[in-house]
Each structure stands twice: as structure tokens, then as C-alpha cells.
Image (spheres, rainbow, N blue to C red):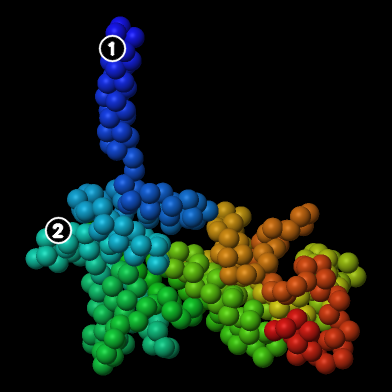
Amino acid sequence: MDSVNGASGSSGSSSTQDSQSVSQAAQTAPTAAETRAQELDDELENNPQATAALAALTADPNYAQLSVEQQVQALDAFNAAPNLATATYLQGVAEQTLDPQATPSALTPDAGTLTLDGQTYDIRNGELIGADGQVAGSIRNDGQVQLAGETAPRSVYDDINTRVQLREADAAGQTRNLVDLHAADPNARLDSADLNRALTQRVESVISRARREGMDMRVTDTYRSVAEQNALYAQGRTAPGRIVTNATGGSSWHNYGLAADIAFNDARGQPSWPENGNWDRYGEIAVANGLEWGGNWRGITDRPHVEYHPGLGAGEARTMLPAYRQGGLQQVWNNLGL
């Protein structure tokens, strides 16, 4: 009897402890929104500006009062363009969700500039002001813009050559940039007929995503002839200048219209190669779009460089030289199934 009673008592105690453990686990388990936020933070780890914007959104008091489902929706919307402007917009959405009568200033930029379709507008409290001083449309902090006469809004991120600067004033009256992007291909290098379209599409996708993350990037080099490659190789060797490449003519995928170099824009919209630029995040985006990134190479790395040559390695460009001599770029692309 003692043995049975003891076993029974032990079982009851264990059941109580299990219930308490389940209850404690339920209390400490992350919500779906917390899990989603952590996923985004991990994905954007190599873009500190984007993770800071995410932190600003999740720390917002209005965001904290949303339901878990609404928070997840906000995070998914943030992921479409994870930058400070989007976070600011979503803070305004959260405020309006809690109080439908509110008209949050965070929904629209206080100031800035927009160059779209060749026309430049000043931004004043969400309104686009044309050169004639008249209101020509509206813009929001999520990048949605609508010109007068247009039936639907469009995104400033859809055209990589859109110049957009969205600015917001803080509580102290200091104005800061939320997003500041210059034209990504002002010299139309990606439009060259000597560039394979499969590469072009991928590069455009990379730049578009980088811009959505607030990274101001631009194309600096694409197709390079064999003769130009040889001249570049001679630099620092038999010609003035410093060594910038170890590839002779025909040994670079640039020579076959299958490579591009991407840099960052500086504050004046000029190409720059900052040591502290988000190169690793750029590389992650490039690889996700099927490109080989020079930053992953062993030995000498080339962080601005991306290339596309399915079926062949980075060091096998020279194997395409006979095809190039026989039928030009098209023959090379045909051989690669492009």
C-alpha cells in the first residue's frame, strides 16, 4: 500500500510540475511578431542602418499596442523596403490604427526632393512642388508617389535611376535624412547591347533591393573589350598607374558582357568605395540573385564585382575566348545557354 500510495503521490506532483512548466514556457515563448522581428534582424545583420530602422519600429509605443497579428503585418510591410523611411511610415500607420481619427505626420516626409521621369520636385509635407511652385502630386514615407493626373500610385524604388531624398524633422526641430538615393546608372551602362540581358536583369534586381534597404549604390563598369582589358592589365606594369587587375584580355568575364562593378554613391552622387560600406550585405543580395560575388574569392577579393556564367567557374573566362573570336559575344552567350 505504501508503495502504491507513494507512486500515486509522485505522479500527482509530477503532473503539477509539468503544468507549471508548460505555463512558464507559454509565458516566455516569443510571439509570432517577436519571431518575425528576429528573423528580419538576422537577415539584415550586415546592413546596420536597416537593423537600426527595424529597432526603431519595434520600439515605437504605438507599435507595441498593436495586436500580434498587426505587428506581423507591419514587419512584413517593413521587409518590402527595410529602411528608416518605411519604419517611420509604419509608426504613423500604427498610430492611425489605434486612433482612426489621427493624421500622423510620420506618414509623409516633411521635406526632400524627388527626380522622377526627368522632372524634379521639392517635397513639402508630403506634397510634390513643381518648378512652377504648384502642387504636382504627393509622396509618402513608404515610397509611394502619385503625380497629378495619374490613376494609381507607384513606388520610388521601381526605377533605379530615381533620385529621392525623404527628410523628417524630429521633436527638437532637427531635420534628418530618412532615405537619400541618387541615380544608380546615370551613364546607362546597363543598357549596353554588349551586356548580356541575363546579367543585366540580375544586377538591376540587386541594386533595386539594395536601394530599398537604403543603400545608395551605382554601376561603375560593365562590358570591357579585350583590348581595353589588356590596357587595364598593363596599368602599373608597363603603363603608368597602379595595378588594378590580374586579368589579361579574354580572362575577365567583363570581356564577354557577363560582369559588372557596383560602387556606392557619396553625398554628392559620385562613385565611392568606402571601407565601411555595406559590402557584405551587397554580396549577400548578389548571391541571392544568382550572381558570383568577388568578395567571396580567396586571395585577392573584389568587393564591387559581380558576374554571371552558369556552368563555369570564375577562373574559366579564358575558355570562352575561342568562341568569342569565332562569333563574338553572341557565340559566347549561346555556348553558355544564355
Left or right of 73 in this view: 36: right
The residue labelled by disc 2 is 98
Instruction: For label 1, count other residues whose C-alpha is less than 10 Å away and answer few (under 14), some (14-19) or many (20+).
Output: few
Residue that carries the numbered disc 1 in the rendered image: 5
Secondary structure category for the residue under label 1: helix
Residue 78 found in image quarter: bottom left
Q: Position of residue 73 (x, y in %)?
A: 30, 61
The answer to whether one can see residue 169 in this image is: no
Q: Is residue 199 left or right of residue 225?
A: left
The CA span between labels 2 and 1 is: 57 Å
Q: Nearer the viewer, residue 158 or 269?
A: 158
At horizontal 68% and vertical 67% (from top left) the residue drawn is 292
Choose mark 2 or mark 1, whichever is in front: 1
Q: Residue at x 27, y 28 (%)?
A: 20
Q: Is residue 20 left or right of residue 37?
A: left
Asked whether 41 or 104 is in front, the reply is 41
User: Mark 2 belongs to which amino acid?
Assistant: Leu
Q: Quadrant of the C terminus?
A: bottom right
Furthest residue toward left: 101
x then y, percent, for residue 123: 29, 76
Cβ atoms under marks 2 and 1 closer than 8 Å: no
The residue sitting at 26% across, 24% down in the picture is 16
Ranked by sequence position, the earlier of labels 2 and 1 is 1
Q: Within 10 Å of the Cα at label 2, are there few (<14), some (14-19), or many (20+) other Cα atoms? A: few
Residue 279 location (% of width, % of height): 59, 59
Is residue 285 at all visible to an observer of this figure?
Answer: yes
